[in-house]
Image (cartoon, grey):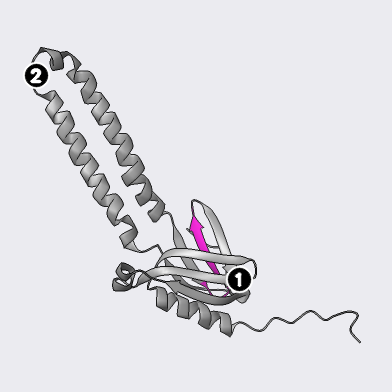
Amino acid sequence: MRVRLRDDERVVVRTRPHLRTILWPTVRLFLIVLVASYGAGFLNREHTEPLATMAPVLHWIVVGVGALLAFKYGVLPIFRWFTTWIILTTQRVVVHRKGVDREVPLDGIFEVDLRQSVAQKVNQSGTMILRTAQGNGIIYNVPAVRTVADLVVEYRDALPARALPVERWAL
């Protein structure tokens, strides 16, 4: 994933959301595969008459349901994590998610807030809220959130001050 940089712009931080965001999808994927494999294996054994005629059909139903559940609750969240990037440049913050770039110019940010749960404090991740005149830009699961927030403030303060518009009819 490449961000198109302006002439005087460079990338400061490029990261994905914290790795703990794919912990539970990975556990769910493992458990779904485990349960579906056990169910399919159980149905492949020899059974008495009522279950023996339905076992091949039930086998493929278990495999299909397991595959759908594994895709929705395991593979898809991991793929979303893998294709999400948080990029801080010297002039803007860019979040690339699902093939779409959402960006917040640093000169439009007037406050940076952090939110962290106890678990997030332990692994130094958290939610970064960028307050602008247009609204809040919320970025979830930022790794090393305090460092990234300090860099946002540092590079925002290093930008040259914007010239205020001159009032045409001022006396």
Q: Which residue is mark 1?
A: 132
Q: Is residue 93 magenta?
A: yes
Name the spot of residue 65 as percent of width and height, x first: 29, 32
Q: Residues within 10 Å of mark 2 (few under 14, many from 20)?
A: few
User: Where is residue 42 shown, x and y percent of the image?
Assistant: 12, 28
Q: Amino acid at mark 1?
A: Thr
Residue 141 position, x and y percent, is 40, 64
Looking at the image, residue 76 lies above or below residue 61: below
Above-or-below relation of 114 to 39: below
Task: Tell me if residue 5 can be seen.
Answer: no
128 sits to left or right of 46:
right
Residue range of the region highlighted in magenta in the rendering: 89-97
Q: Are marks 1 and 2 in contact (CB under 8 Å)?
A: no
**Which numbered disc covers residue 90?**
none
Q: What residue is at 91 percent from the left and 87 percent from the top?
A: 171
Q: Residues within 10 Å of mark 1 (few under 14, many from 20)?
A: some
Q: Main secondary structure of the magenta part?
A: strand
The verdict on residue 52 being magenta is: no
Instruction: Tell me where residue 134 sits by quadrant.
Output: bottom right
Q: CA distance from mark 1 to mark 2?
A: 66 Å
Q: In terms of depth relative to the viewer, which is nearer, 100 or 61?
A: 61
- Depth check: give the residue in front, 164 or 89: 164
Q: Residue beneath label 2, please? A: 47
Looking at the picture, which amino acid does disc 2 mark? His
Q: Is residue 135 left or right of residue 26?
A: right
